[in-house]
Amino acid sequence: MDVIPELAKITQRLIERSRPTREAYLERVDAAASAGPHRSSLTCGNLAHGFAACGPGDKTKLTGDVVPNIAIINSYNDMLSAHQPFGDFPDIIKDEARKNEAVAQIAAGVPAMCDGVTQGQKGMELSLFSRDVIAMATAIGLSHNMFDAALYLGVCDKIVPGLLIGALTFGHIPAVFVPAGPMPSGLPNDEKVRVRQAYAEGKVGRDELLKAESASYHSPGTCTFYGTANSNQMLMEFMGLHLPGSSFVNPGTELREALTRAATRRALAISGMGNEFTPVGHVIDEKAIVNGIVGLHTTGGSTNHVLHLVAIAAAAGIVLTLKDMADIAACTPLLARVYPNGMADVNHFHAAGGLPYLVGELTRNGHLHTDVKTIHGGGMDAMAQEPKLSKNGGVTFTDAARISGNDRVIGTIAEPFSKTGGLVMLDGNIGRAVIKISAVKEEHHIIEAPVRIFETQNGIKDAFDAGELNRDVIAVCRFQGPRANGMPELHKLTPPLGVLQDRGFKVALVTDGRMSGASGKVPAAIHMTPEAVDGGGIAKLRDGDIVRLDATTGELTAKVDQAEWDAREVASIDLSPNRYGMGVELFGAFRAMVSGSDAGASAIAASKNDAKARIHA
């Protein structure tokens, strides 16, 4: 089935806008594919270094250019629950490669940090920049020109986008992304929310809060709420880089291992030495990007991907804009209710049919491009399948159910939870921002109230604790953008602002920082650009200004006389405390080079030509 006209129109303008940079990218990819990677192009000294640590069998295989060699790019560490399962994956992959007369080598380890650990801490100022570091680390691992395909082991916030940007830089190498899966369900989400808000109000102590958090995040695997980590897994599936239905299979299960082995076999099949050569630079095209955005909106995914998808697209020569994403949201129905957009977690979502059901429902109704390449083979239709364990311990794929297993968790095109995906672009004299309203009640879609200016999230919390915010208020948290301090997430604000809203006040947040996948019921205009440090309108706001945030019309305006607004000086603050401590001093060059939020907040992904194309979009 053809896609709906609205989606076709957006896709076509994306193709036309991107034509010069996309064509140049594909020329580089195809030239690299025709030249290699071939180990025979390496000198004897090069090659000897490349397989010196291998066992005799693998060394013999790699001596000639006759068997495929798979790169493993691994984000394993055993501090982070989502990445701990990857400790065992390389041995599984190597064993499966040998069974198929091939070789696999760990080409690189990339850093993996957790926003949940650094939340509200100095280390959070490294979080967004870690995406670019991961992309560069991926490139270093692949630079040896030893590999015919690559398996990417990653789950969480900046890791998967960084891996994909790195993979696209080596777009001639086929890429298969391998998930680890979510931890089993723990404390119910409604109870977790209750304890957090009670702690914010001082009704419970730290001991009870820690007990609740520990019951929520309790074992290896991804956190079970639908934040950036699980949104990453959805994106890889919707963009054709995962095996169907593999995103939310729990770690440590027979099916999880079988899927990892199957992913290894697919990497061999789509390598240049297989029968289905599928370089990643051709998998991720404009239609795949659009499919990923549809997936993001229909599931109510993380707003972090408003940044990441722009940077990912740029790495593939595609010029994506905020307007594209907002327009796709406007024609994409919300079909999932997963916390924080509902009380179900990703395990409940998966049990109700999960991503295979959604892919089927969307393709049958023209909301996904089916004529795309996937690592599974076939188009997007082939991704509407569920993996099952076969009798011999392998994986078989069966057609996904055509009926939701729980209509309170997954809806239908005919009866969606909302007619739109819930991402809205806001614009006005303050600047340009985005807002995610899929979890915001309709009565809170329009907020007009006086602002209170803050320059740290701790300042908002202190004012809340002092009772200074018990009124209609729009809290402005500025100097939180990528150039100011690396654009940390501001999750400390969610509980106190939620309490104020529950007390009946009109409340909203406006910031040049991030809120990500855990942003929920309080309207939050985030990713403001230009950011305050660049002299954006957010830096002209003063305490008491009346601001109108209207998610129905896309307006974000300070109701200040134009002459007064034009005459106002731009506020500035001493940013020297953001230049040192917890390693941030190493990232001065990143802060100096980083693009604006609307261009992906990246120090590496967007070229000058991309920027010029974006300006004229």
Image (tube, rainbow, N blue to C red):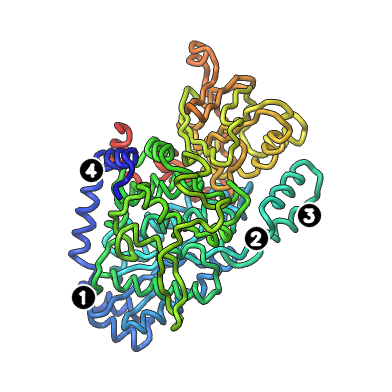
Q: Could you tell me residue 164's position as x and y percent?
A: 39, 57
Q: Residues within 10 Å of mark 4 (few under 14, many from 20)?
A: some
Dot 3: within a 10 Å radius of its alpha carbon, few (fewer than 14), some, or many (20 or more) residues?
some
Q: Earlier in the sequence, mark 3 or mark 1?
A: 1
The residues tagged by marks 2 and 3 sit, at their Cα atoms, a distance apart of 14 Å
Residue located at (28% from left, 38% from top): 13
Residue picked out by circle 1: 40
**Secondary structure under the numbered disc 1 in the rendered image:** helix
Q: Name the residue under label 2.
A: 217
Q: Which of marks 4 and 3 is nearer the N terminus?
A: 4
Residue extending farthest to the bottom is: 56
Q: Nearer the viewer, mark 4 or mark 1?
A: 4
Q: Which amino acid does label 2 sit on?
A: Tyr
Q: Residue 19 carries which label?
A: 4
Tag 4: residue type?
Arg
Point out the tag, 4 or 1, that comes first from the N-terminus: 4
Q: Earlier in the sequence, mark 2 or mark 1?
A: 1
Residue picked out by circle 3: 208
- Residue contact at pointers 4 and 1, CB within 8 angstroms: no
Image coordinates of residue 412 in percent, x first then y, are 47, 49
| Residue kind at label 3, given as amino acid type | Glu
Of the numbered discs 2 and 3, the one sitting upstream in the chain is: 3
SS at circle 2: loop
